[in-house]
Amino acid sequence: MTTNNNQTTTSFFPVKESFYSLQGEGHHSGIAAYFIRLEGCNIRCDWCDTKTSWNINKNNFLTVNQIIHNINSKVKTIVITGGEPMMWNLSPLTRILKKKGYRIHVETSGSYPIHEDFIDWITISPKKKKLPLKENYKKMNELKIIICDENDFFFAEEQAGYVKKNSHCVLLLQPEWNQNIKIIPKIISYIKNHPKWKISLQIHKMLNIP
């Protein structure tokens, strides 16, 4: 393995899990997709719902060929998530996936460099503990802000201000799952007053989609 800008370049990736399901949140909510969840996270939010992906298990490293061999033959869209998937230079994997005709989506905090040449859709969900790199704001297709309390609306506006002007980037507010009951009405009210935003709901949890 070699490192560049704190990002690891390798032909092996630590895969926590991979599965075929429906995208449960964000702009592409509801579509069928194959998920590749990589291990390793540099932020570790208290409310994270995938804490099991934080640590890197040396026994979970798979080669690019092994990862691709496991992909469901029906799938058209690949979602690479984590953890923080951009801890790894994904190019060795995404280059081959693109050659095979897959549409590639990546979900990241934006705190690592993004090599977007082989990625079709970039979702950045900024975290206050470690903000996105400045150059990544112009690369994102979707800005998704997790709302835990009313202070997060100020954070959302601050982050939206960094998005390139006249960009077609989708702006999303998503309630933190444990705060759904009290925060969703506030998000609805906020979006009605600030219609540049859309709401993102975790429908996979609501519908118990595995």
Image (cartoon, rainbow, N blue to C red):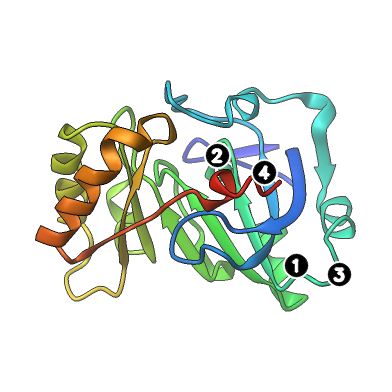
In the rendered structure, which amino acid carries the disc numbered 3? Ser
Tag 3 secondary structure: loop
**Residue 125 to residue 123: above or below:** above
Q: Secondary structure at mark 1?
A: helix
Q: Is residue 182 above or below residue 69?
A: above
Q: Earlier in the sequence, mark 1 or mark 2?
A: 2
Q: CA distance from mark 1 to mark 2?
A: 19 Å
Whole-Å distance between the Cαs marked 4 and 3? 18 Å
Q: Amino acid at mark 2?
A: Met
Upstream in sequence: badge 2 or badge 3 = 3
Of residues 129 and 73, the one drawn nearer to the viewer in this rendering: 73
Residue at which label 4 appears: 37
| Mark nearer the N terminus (2 vs 4) | 4
- Residue that badge 1 annotates: 96
Q: Amino acid at mark 1?
A: Ile
Q: Which residue is mark 2?
A: 87
**Please, what is the three-letter code of the amino acid marked with disc 4?**
Arg
Looking at the rendered image, the disc whose residue lies closer to the viewer, 2 or 4, is 4
* Residue 84 circle label: none
